[in-house]
Image: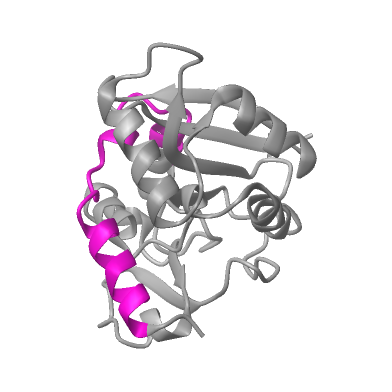
Amino acid sequence: MTPPATVAALQAAMAASETTEWLEGLEPFNTEAQKISELPPAASKKAFFVEIGGGYGHQCINLAKKYPGLERRLIFQDLPEVVNKLPPIDGVRIMAHSLFEKQIIRGSRFYYLRQVLRNWPDDEVIKILQNIAANMSHRSRILIDDIVLPDSHAPWQATLADMLLMIGVGTKERSRKKWESLAERAGLRIEQVHSYVKAGCPAVVVLALK
């Protein structure tokens, strides 16, 4: 079991980066979210967005506000010691789930990880991705919201984050080539890389089944 102090520290880090800038210009996510949001209440409630290891479910909360019609199609997953302390979130299903277990939601349109994989070494990242891929459909996509380093001349914000990761958890930020390699080894492919802020190099890496 993860030590409570470690869980608390991770939650605080997540809370510091709960912005929705990643949504700006990300297609087909926004178009599909809007279409589903406009469906009648009696329509299918198949999962649309699964936020995995998201601290307090920040992105599910933000999406529920932006697209009210996604109610009950938004799912937040984290460890039992995290979700058991959370209050109910309007319109969001909360589930206990470990990254290192097979994904329990089959065929969601999107599976989202924000600043999660950067905390794990390559072999563990591959296992995490394979666990999600095991229940993806051909339309499912994994959204990795993380740092994507350029091959050279990385901004100081990104290099600082890289140093802090190395000191704190012994991992490193990754370049596009590195993300491509990890995706390949997990049986996935990169469909697009959506950069949304120049400073710090945050981007959404969109993965699909091969």
Q: Position of residue 3 (x, y in %)?
A: 41, 83
The relative height of residue 87 versus residue 106 in the rendered view (above or below) is below
Magenta stretch mostly in which secondary structure? helix
User: At x 45% / y 24%, what residue is drawn?
Assistant: 149
Quick check: is 10 in the magenta stretch?
Answer: yes
Q: Position of residue 74 (x, y in %)?
A: 42, 61
User: At x 53% / y 60%, what residue is drawn?
Assistant: 47
| Along the line of sight, the residue nearer the viewer: 182 or 141 | 182
User: At x 62% / y 30%, what residue is drawn?
Assistant: 178
Per the rendered image, the range of residues in magenta is 4-32
Quick check: is 23 in the magenta stretch?
Answer: yes
As drawn, is 13 to the left or to the right of 205?
left
The relative height of residue 178 versus residue 152 in the rendered view (above or below) is below
| Along the line of sight, the residue nearer the viewer: 175 or 28 | 175
Q: Position of residue 197 (x, y in %)?
A: 28, 24
The image quarter in which residue 61 lies: bottom left
The relative height of residue 3 versus residue 145 in the rendered view (above or below) is below
As drawn, is 47 to the left or to the right of 8?
right
User: At x 26% / y 41%, what residue is drawn?
Assistant: 20
Tally the marks.
0
